[in-house]
Amino acid sequence: MEKLLDRFLRYVAIDTQSNEESESQPSESKELVLLNLLRDELTTLGVKADLDEFGYVMASIPANNGKDSPAIGFIAHVDTAPDASGKDVKPQIIKDYDGSDIALKAVPGLFLKPSEFPELLLHKGETLVTTDGTTLLGADDKAGVAEIMDAVQYIVTHPEFKHGPIRIGFTPDEEIGRGVVKFDVKKFGADYAYTMDGGEVGELEFENFNAAAASIHIQGRNVHPGYAKGKMLNALHIGEEFDALLPQDQRPERTEGYEGFFHLIGMKGSVEDADLTYIIRDHDKSKFEKKKQLMRRCADFINARYGEGTVTATIKDSYYNMREQVEPHYHIIETAAKAMEMAGVKPRIQPIRGGTDGANLSFRGLPCPNLFAGGQNFHGKMEWVTVESMEKATKVILNILSLYSM
C-alpha cells in the first residue's frame, strides 16, 4: 500500500493554481493534470470513476454491508490559491519536529517560527512538511485529496471493512469561488457529504460567512495639475475617501469569531479613473445585508459630493451561511464528532471565517459540513502540515463510514 506522505508529495508537485481572470472551467487546463491522475488512480484501485467536461471527478464505491445505509460523500478541491505560486513546489520534510525555528531554506533568513505560529508546538514529535519559502505548499486542499484517496485505498484493500454507499468528488476552482458551480449533485448521488478542507486537527465546521464581492468604479476628471483648482477630480483620492467611509474596526485584521468585515483586496487606477474591489463577509444574514446597504450609502454620499456617476457600486452575492441547511440534519455533525473521538481527536465545532464548497452544495440539497484536513497557514509560503494530522483525517473518514454502516 502506498504511504499517505508519498501520495501527498506527488500531488503537491503538480501545479494546479486556479485563475480568477479566466472564464473557462476549469479556469486553468493544468488543473486537469491532477484531475486526470486522480481518475486514473481510482480506476486502478478498482473504483468506478469519471472526469466530466467541467473538471469534476466523481467516483462511487458500492455498499458491502447489506443494509439500507445512506450514501456518504467526501469532497476535496485540487486547485491552489492565486495568492502565491504553486509552481515547482519543493517541500521540506522535518521528522520528529523538536519545536525549534524552521529555516525555509530557499530564502535566506526566512524562518517558520513557533514565536509567530505557536500552533507548531502542538505538533512536536511529528513529521512536519513545509515549503522551501518560494511557493505555497498546497495542503489546501491536496491534504484533503490525499486523505480521501488514502481512505479509498484502505477500503478497497480491506474487504472486511463494512460500509454503505460511498461517493468521492474532486473539484477545480474552489479558490476562486467557482468550485461547484456546475457540480451535478444528482449525479453525485450522496445523501450527505463532507468537504475535507479545514485546518487544524479537530475542526468541524457547519457555519460559514455569507459572502459578497463588490466592485467600486470611480470616475474622475483629469486636468493639467498646474490649472486643476476647482476642476480636477482625482479618482485615486476619491477611492481613498470612499474606503475611509467604511468602518475601520470591520477589517479582517481587526475581527475574529463571528465578527464580519469589509476587505479591500484590490485598488488600481489613475487620476482619470480607479477601481476598488472588496469582499464582504458576515455570519449573520441581517448584518450581512446591512453591510451591503452601507456600501451603497457610501457610494451615494460620494456621488452627492462630487456628482452623480462618480461612483458606481456593483455588489454580487457569492455564497451563504450553510448553517440553516445543515442544522436540520444535525446527525451529520454528531456523527463526525463521534468519529473524531474514536480517532483520539477532540472535536472543535467552530464557524469558518471563510467559505467552502460545502456551503453552495448545502443550498443545492446536499448537506455538507467541513472537516479538518490538517494544514496550517494556507495561501502562502508559511503553509505547513504534519503527516500525523493527515493520518488522523483519514481515520475520521473511515470512522464516519463505519458509524453510518451500523
Image (cartoon, rainbow, N blue to C red):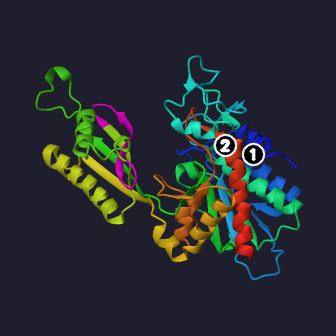
Q: Is residue 201 above or below residue 108?
A: below
Mark 2–mark 1 CB contact (< 8 Å): yes
Q: Residue 292's image quarter?
A: bottom left
Which residue is label 1 attached to? Answer: 33
Which residue is label 2 attached to? Answer: 16
Instruction: Work out whether residue 292 or residue 383 is closer to the camera in this orientation and state it.
Output: 383
**Range shown magenta:** 256-273
Q: Is residue 125 visible?
A: yes
Q: Residue 329's image quarter?
A: bottom right
Instruction: Work out whether residue 257 or residue 226 is closer to the camera in this orientation and state it.
Output: 257
**Under tag 1, what secondary structure?**
helix
In three-dimensional space, the C-alpha distance between marks 2 and 1, rounded to whole angstroms, equals 8 Å
**Under tag 2, what secondary structure?**
loop
Q: Is residue 23 visible?
A: no
Q: Quadrant of the C terminus?
A: bottom right
> How many residues crowd mark 2 within 10 Å: few (<14), some (14–19), many (20+)?
many
| Type of the residue with mark 1 | Val
Residue 355 on image: x %, y %: 50, 55
User: Which residue shows up at 54% across the image and 69% down it?
Assistant: 362
